Image (cartoon, rainbow, N blue to C red):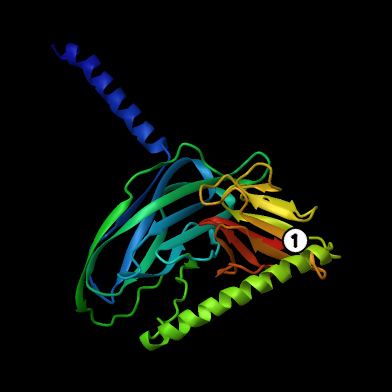
Amino acid sequence: MKRVYVPFIAIVLAFVFAFNVHAQTSESIWLTASTTAYKTGETVSVTLNAISATPIQGFTFQIRYDPDCLRPINAASSIPGMNGLPLPQLSGQVDGSYASTTPQIVNGLLAEIRFVTLGGCQTDLMLESAALAIRSAEGFAAPLAGVTIGERNINLNIDKEVAESLPAQPLSGSILPLDPPSTSQGVPGWALGLLATLVVAGIIFGAFKLFRTRSGVTQKMSPPSRSAALHIKHGPQAGKSIVINKLPFLIGRDPLNDICLNDPHVISQHARIFATNNDYYLMDLGGETFVNGQAIRKSPAILKPGDVVRLGKSALFVFGS
């Protein structure tokens, strides 16, 4: 009778072993938290975790938060050689990116992300997107295909009671600041009428000035004496360096642009680079365009080496030679 069970047990053990091997080799990313109940003024710590049988050389993440309840502080990765790449931040979303020159297998903690609680509320943290990065055959950074995102949401309950002031626990590893953009103070009520009048006058003056600026650009457009290039750091074509070899230089989602960025937050013709008076300029064409975190609206912005340009939510490049 015992001989009958031996093959059956062997089959069960083989199935369990095969299942465990499959679980260990599937690429996935997920968000966790040790606790979800906090007081006002306490530090919220969540961890980004991953498992990958393929050696990686970086990772990215975007986490949504309520700016009325939480303020991001920083992130840290304890993976040896993994360095944080500072990115312009948006209110309500932390955008983190890490890179390493050495491929590494990951099985557990990728990064710890910290927030401070601002007041009593119930809120969520949501892992909006995440990716593991590898180096392509051409030597450029590329997202690892087939990565699944597991647990995305963490529900937080923040009590309005203020917590006792305690020293913050130090973070280990490569620290990445996640300071939210500064917000200006609201306009006093008594000034709204005056502001409306100035806005009307400003629109008229701005339209006239913009017309003159564009006319002047058309007349004085000339290539600068120095060469320039765009070094793409985040988003489609990340890792590439593209030389500006013609002017004007168009960037957008349309394949007919000089740089095509297949990104849902980049419009068909998003921005244009042109030159005048021996300088390069960047003009927004109707999308969301930022230079060093400052939005470009109606007037073109001069580009200097080292300037960080963001199109939409995540397409990021550095202007240089």
Instruction: Kindly indicate the quadrant of the structure image that contains residue 48.
Output: bottom left
Instruction: Kindly indicate the quadrant of the structure image that contains residue 293.
Output: bottom right
Residue located at (15% from left, 14% from top): 2
From the top left corner, tell me how far across and down residue 80 is, in percent.
Answer: 51, 58
Residue located at (43% from left, 50% from top): 129
Residue placed under numbered mark 1 in the picture: 274
Decide which of 221, 195 is in the foreground and name it.
195
Q: Can the viewer see residue 305?
A: no
Residue located at (80% from left, 67% from top): 276
Q: Is residue 150 above or below residue 94?
A: above
Taking the image as shown, residue 301 lies to the left or right of residue 23, namely right
For the C terminus, the image quarter is bottom right
Classify mark 1: helix, strand or loop.
strand
From the top left corner, tell me how far across and down residue 87 is, in percent.
Answer: 54, 64
From the top left corner, tell me how far across and down residue 8 is, in percent.
Answer: 22, 16
Q: Is residue 5 above or below residue 303?
A: above
Q: Amino acid at mark 1?
A: Phe
Q: Can the viewer see residue 196?
A: yes
